[in-house]
Structures are given as structure tokens and as C-alpha cells.
């Protein structure tokens, strides 16, 4: 599916569509250049799941944990600062991926070899028609 997002309010609908289409999946890898909107989209997804509070990129902490409306954990990763698979393994990243809880991963290229085979790839980019405020989301 491909979505053209020209209004931030459309992210909620896109989040709902993603989670509905892959209702049995829990690991989502978000690909896109810096500023493509990965954190903003993950925030919309977490809000749709009922997470409260500030949903922000875990750039320096690597992992943020939120709770969904049922009190279940949601894990948000930013792997940008990891130096490789070894760093990810040291923090026990695979335990999160196989926990059965939602895992949303920014910069998954760094940990691709550790991702479950059935993870869902979500690609974000700027619209190539010259409008820097429009994003394309594909999953």
C-alpha cells in the first residue's frame, strides 16, 4: 500500500490501516532518510494504540517504552547510534523483537540480520514532486 500524506492529520488513518492490515504482526522496521517522518509516523501509531504522553525519538536512549491502552508495553527503537549488531545484542534487542509486543524500529538497517523474518518494512520518503511537506509512506 502507498499513502501520500499531505496533512499530518492523515497519519492517524494511515496508522490504523497499517495495524489493521498486519494485525498479527508486532515488529515494524521504518526505513527513510533523516527527516522523512519516521518518528512522527511512529508517534501516530503509538497514539492510535492508546499510548499516553510524549512519543519521541529514542536517539540517545536507543529504546523508549510506552504502554498501550491495555497496559502492554510498546517498544520504540532508534538504532542510528548503534555501532553494529554487536551493540544491539549487548542491549538484548532480540528479546524485545521476540517478546510478542509491538516493536517500532527506526534505522533498522543496522540490525537487519536480527529482525524476525516476518517483520513488516515501512518505507517513508519525501514526495519527489518538489513539495517538501508531502511524505510518501509505503508498506
Image (cartoon, helix red, strand yellow):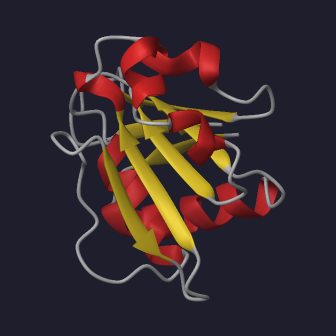
Furthest residue in direction left, as rendered: 60
Tell me the residue at 56%/61% (across/down).
15
Image quadrant where residue 35 sits: top left
- Whether residue 122 can be seen here: yes
Question: Horizontally, is 50 left or right of 79 in the view?
Answer: right
Q: Position of residue 13 (x, y in %)?
A: 56, 67
| In this view, 69 is above or below 84 | below
**Outermost residue, bottom direction?**
70
User: Residue 79 at x, y = what percent?
Assistant: 34, 29
Residue at 40%, 70% (x, y): give it. 66
Q: Nearer the viewer, residue 1 or 42?
A: 42
- Towards the viewer: 23 or 97: 97
Residue 1 falls in image quadrant:
top right
Say left or right for 76 vs 93: left
Taking depth in this image into account, of 11 and 128 the one nearest to the observer is 11
Image position of 95 with respect to 48: above or below: above
Q: Position of residue 75 (x, y in %)?
A: 47, 56
Query: Does 116 sit left or right of 93 as displayed?
Result: right
* Residue 10 in view (yes/no): no
At 47% from the left and 39% from the top, the residue drawn is 105
What's the residue at 65%, 60% (across, down)? 101
Q: Tell me if residue 5 comes above or below residue 126 in the rendering.
A: below
Q: Quadrant of the C terminus?
A: top right
Amino acid at each position: 500500500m502507498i499513502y501520500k500524506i499531505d496533512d499530518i492529520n492523515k497519519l492517524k488513518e494511515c496508522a490504523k490501516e497499517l495495524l489493521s492490515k498486519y494485525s498479527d504482526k508486532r515488529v515494524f522496521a521504518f526505513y527513510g532518510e533523516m527527516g522523512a517522518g519516521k518518528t512522527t509516523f511512529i508517534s501516530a501509531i503509538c497514539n492510535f494504540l492508546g499510548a499516553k504522553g510524549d512519543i519521541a525519538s529514542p536517539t540517545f536512549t536507543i529504546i523508549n517504552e510506552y504502554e498501550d491502552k491495555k497496559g502492554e508495553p510498546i517498544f520504540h527503537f532508534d538504532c542510528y547510534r548503534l555501532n553494529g549488531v554487536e551493540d544491539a545484542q549487548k542491549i538484548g534487542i532480540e528479546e524485545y523483537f521476540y517478546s510478542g509486543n509491538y516493536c517500532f524500529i527506526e534505522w533498522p538497517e543496522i540490525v537487519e540480520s536480527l529482525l524476525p523474518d516476518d517483520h513488516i518494512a515501512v518505507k517513508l520518503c519525501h514526495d519527489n514532486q518538489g513539495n517538501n511537506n508531502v511524505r510518501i509512506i509505503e508498506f
